[in-house]
Amino acid sequence: MLARLKHRATKAGIPFDIDKDDIVIPTHCPVLGIKLHWNQGKGYHPDSPSVDKINPNLGYVKGNVRVISARANLLKNDATIEELTKVLEDLRALNI
């Protein structure tokens, strides 16, 4: 996971200074409350852990990353009103 993030950051030209200790994987997604699972195989798995840049403009830097579900990270693509409400509530709690 860390190697993929570093590659993605390098390719996008965004800052990267995190290490494995900065990636804390909870049992449940802090945004949607769904249980997280390590899914194997290719393809999209909405309940897989996914590293979120809290403020996308800062990059993958200490204090700006957290692990949420892949679904929460992709909500803006095809979200329902209920899902968007949960994301909004989370962003308000973070004061972004």
Image (spheres, grey):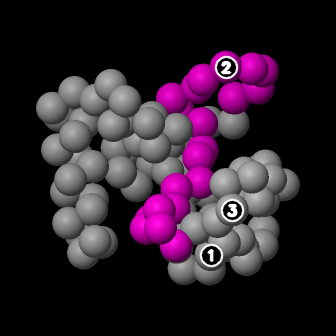
Q: Residues within 10 Å of mark 1 (few under 14, many from 20)?
A: some
* x and y percentages locating residue 34 in the rendered image: 42, 39
71 to 9, vertically: above or below: above
The image quarter containing residue 81 is top left
The amino acid type, in three-letter code, at marker 2 is Gly
Query: Does residue 7 appear left or right of residue 82 in this picture?
Result: right
Q: Secondary structure at mark 2?
A: loop
Which residue in the protein does label 2 denote? 43
Q: Nearer the viewer, residue 9 or 62?
A: 9
Query: Does residue 77 appear left or right of residue 15 in this picture?
Result: left
Q: Between label 1 and label 2, give the one nearer the viewer.
A: 1
- Residue drawn where x is 19% and y is 57% of the image: 89
Query: Which of the two labelled residues, at mark 2 and mark 3, occupies the earlier sequence position?
Result: 3
Please check the rendered image and state whether residue 41 is part of the magenta-colored stretch, yes or no. Answer: yes
* x and y percentages locating residue 93 in the rendered image: 24, 69
Which residue in the protein does label 1 denote? 61
- Residue drawn where x is 69% and y is 29% of the image: 39
Q: Which disc is residue 13 wearing?
A: 3
Q: Is residue 28 visible?
A: no
Please check the rendered image and state whether residue 43 is part of the magenta-colored stretch, yes or no. Answer: yes
Q: Nearer the viewer, residue 28 or 16?
A: 16
Q: Residues within 10 Å of mark 2 (few under 14, many from 20)?
A: few
The amino acid type, in three-letter code, at marker 3 is Gly
Q: Which residues are magenta?
A: 39-58
33 to 90, vertically: above or below: above
Q: Secondary structure at mark 1?
A: loop
Mark 1 near mark 3, Cβ–Cβ under 8 Å? Answer: no
Q: Residues within 10 Å of mark 3 (few under 14, many from 20)?
A: few
Distance from Cα at disc 1 to Cα at disc 2? 27 Å
Q: Between label 2 and label 3, give the one nearer the viewer.
A: 3
- Residue drawn where x is 78% and y is 68% of the image: 20
